[in-house]
Amino acid sequence: MMETVNLIVYGTLMRGKANSHLCRNATFISLCKIKGTLYKTGWGYPAFVPGGKGVVKAEFVVLPESDWPAIERLEGYPTLYDRRKIGNLSELREEIDDCVAYHRNGVSC
């Protein structure tokens, strides 16, 4: 059985965006929404900060664990971005709690 990670992607990792190829082996589950704010960084990718009153549109995917190192390098984990378990609301209005999302270190809402 292949090990997988429930991952919330936003910005350049979403389908059709610049870094979506890093998720080519992922299974798309649904569009979703996560609580937080997405900031423009000016460097061609956004910064997600969880919490606050905002809502960010994202995608819920199931990623093979073997593909995770490439995502970690892109995100600059753990220096630039960290990861945390986060809940989301899928397009089917179903709450999913066991997902990982990357968030920008050193920024708060």
Image: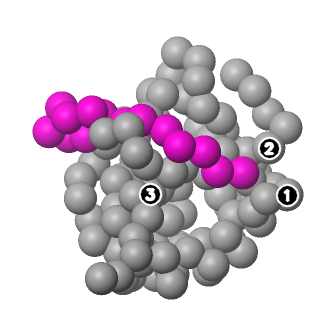
In the image, residue 66 lies at what x, y percent?
A: 51, 84
Q: Residues within 10 Å of mark 3 (few under 14, many from 20)?
A: many
Q: Amino acid at mark 2?
A: Asn
Q: Which residues are magenta?
A: 82-95
Question: What is the distance, in whole Å, between disc 3 and disc 2 at their CAs?
Answer: 18 Å
Q: Is residue 63 left or right of residue 37?
A: left
Indicate the quadrant where residue 28 lies: bottom left
Q: Is residue 16 visible?
A: no
Q: Is residue 86 magenta?
A: yes
Q: Quadrant of the C terminus?
A: top right
* Residue occupying the point 79% across, 44% down: 105
Read off the residue under disc 1.
79
Q: Residue at x 75, y 62 (%)?
A: 77
Residue reaching furthest to the front? 1
Depicted 108 relative to depicted 62: above or below: above
Disc number placed over residue 7 in the picture, else none: 3
Mark 3 or mark 2: whose residue is earlier in sequence: 3
Q: Position of residue 23 (x, y in %)?
A: 43, 75
Viewer-nearest residue: 52 or 68: 68
Q: Are marks 1 and 2 in contact (CB under 8 Å)?
A: yes
Locate the N terminus by quadrant.
bottom left
Q: Residue at x 85, y 38 (%)?
A: 106
Residue on which disc 2 sits: 105
- At label 3, which amino acid type do we have? Leu
